[in-house]
Image (cartoon, rainbow, N blue to C red):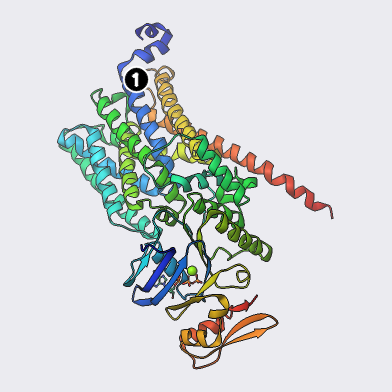
Amino acid sequence: MNAGEAAVALDRVAVTLGERPVLREVSFRLEAEQFCALIGTNGSGKTTLLRAILGFIPVQAGRIDLPAGAIGYVPQKITLDPGLPLRARDVIALGLDGARFGTRLPSKARAVRVQEMLRAVGAEEFAEQRVGTLSGGQQQRVLLAHALVRRPKLLLLDEPLANLDVGSTAEIVALLRRLSHEFGAAVLLSAHDMNPLLPVVDRIVYLANGCAVSGKADEVVRTEVLSRLYGYHVDVLRVHGRVVVIAAGARTESRDALERDPVHTITVP
Amino acid sequence: MDSICTWGHMGGFWCNQPVRVALAVGGGAALVCAVVGLSTVMRRQAFAGHALADVSGAGGSASYLLGINPLFGFLGMAAAAAGVMEWAQVREARERDLLTGVVLGAGLGLAALLLYLDMTVRNVSGAAITVLFGSMFTIPPSIVPVALIVAAAALGASALIFRPLLVSTLSIDLARAQGARVRTIARIHAMALALAVSLAAMTVGAILSTALLIGPAAAALQVARRPASALALAVLIGLAATWGGIALAYQSYYWTPGRGWPVSFFIVMLIVCAYLLASAVARRRSGSSATAPLSGCQEH
Ligand SMILES: Nc1ncnc2c1ncn2[C@@H]1O[C@H](COP(=O)(O)OP(=O)(O)OP(=O)(O)O)[C@@H](O)[C@H]1O
Ligand SMILES: [Mg+2]
């Protein structure tokens, strides 16, 4: 870790899964307390990138610099067993020291911290319920609290907005932005729909073709920048205050993906 | 202590040496099985637990041939099977089940051979019943100290991995992100499981030890909402069923003069009763919470 402010810095990172080079050369840097969206179509490698940062999968080349201490993480796919005897409150408490060996007697200080987290994410109402029996959005809040309770300097959220309705999406986005300020954590949040995020993000990392561009939204989401990233011509259109990225060029695999999933409907503030 | 020996025929119960051994070894086995069984059920490894218990029967059978303490026989075989299953590093649930099935088949096949040899070579006629279904009143007192050490080791291991095991049961990824050593934890758990099933096999037999391992935990999980209460309830059910079963079996000598029924039968029946009771409580609870909000939907 260098002495700078970076919450995470990637330098020419390459990751191969099986035979497939998923990330070819990804570099970007996230400063402390920045709120950043990781954008890309399905299969572009967002989850792979986050798992590489966490050290779950090895990198073939390049380096990843991380701050000392805890990293908060909420995975993309997580099914919480309704049969587990764990209340929302217990799950958050496990975020404090769940990795440590040995048992521990309950303490007042821990209970207070858990209660603070429950309040921060708005989960007091269902604190006593078994976590597996909560709704998707409620579980998302509990997992967020689990990730934040150790006050990490970096929070990695994999598609936290998937499966949320419009109202809940706006609520969670506002909550994330507020918590990032409150806890002084840099946030790297993956999504394939940028719309709800654009009003609040400091920057975006746009992933395509195994490479990434990063910067402010209006620096990245431009015809020439994205065309260079995709390796063929794409149009960034502004329609009714929204930005739409449309493929228009040679048929390639990733172009198909973009046509199948034209989710890059981006509202520029 | 010995003054209670004069309390009617239950006085005889407390002062009877085989009964005391059964209470000590059975109590230890019930306690350990409740604790280890709870994490086993939560990790959805009930089948692996059952397989280890059955396979340990081959070790129990071998102990008669080798002339060693049967607990060491059960333990050696269960530990070897747990080692094979854990170190094979199978991740996917389906493949894990297949491997478990293969290990189970191999272990039972071996047990069949060893039991045959016990009966033909060593002339131990009751070996099959004792190994497979237990015979608590014939446990030699020399086993008590060894059993207590095994129990303490299993409980120590369970306490050590209690928290990280909970997190990795919730999600392996969450545990790894927190820095938990998930493989080490899984291996320690597998060894605790081997210790637990060998103790259970010693008391209720290799085949029935599944009941002691899975039953109390499954019953507790139906009603408990937090880890500590699930643990307490599982231990309570396990101990009550085991000690209650021993008392009933002792009583049964008076119902059918001179020919008491097997302890294992009573223990397993009491566990089944506890499970049914817990199911009823859980159903009542969810029933009462489900009907309230629905009734409001009828009025438009
Ligand atoms: N274990 C694996 N072995 C081989 N290839 C894999 C493996 N896991 C993922 N991949 C491939 O890597 C690519 C990137 O997958 P990844 O899950 O990172 O995408 P993603 O951007 O998170 O997609 P989504 O938006 O659908 O979550 C995909 O093409 C996928 O097929
Ligand atoms: Mg993904």
Residue B179 horizontal side relative to residue B237, left or right: left
Instruction: Relative to B250, say whether B119 is above or below.
Output: below
How crowded pointer 1 is (Cα within 10 Å; few <14, some 14-19, many 20+) is rated as: many
Residue B187 horizontal side relative to residue B221, left or right: left
Q: Residue furthest front?
A: A3
Amino acid type of disc 1?
Val
Distance from mark 1 CB to nearest ligand 1 atom below 8 Å: no
Residue A32 is situated, as x and y percent measured from the top left of the image, at 48, 62
The answer to whether any part of residue B133 appears in the image is no
Residue A161 horizontal side relative to residue B24, left or right: right
Q: Tell me which residue sits at (36%, 10%) in the image.
A: B1
Residue B176 is situated, as x and y percent measured from the top left of the image, at 40, 55
Q: Quadrant of the N terminus of chain A?
A: bottom left
The residue to which callout 1 is attached is B19
SS type, badge 1: helix
Foreground residue among A219 and A226: A219
Residue B170 is situated, as x and y percent measured from the top left of the image, at 47, 51
Q: Tell me which residue sits at (49%, 35%) in the image.
A: A107
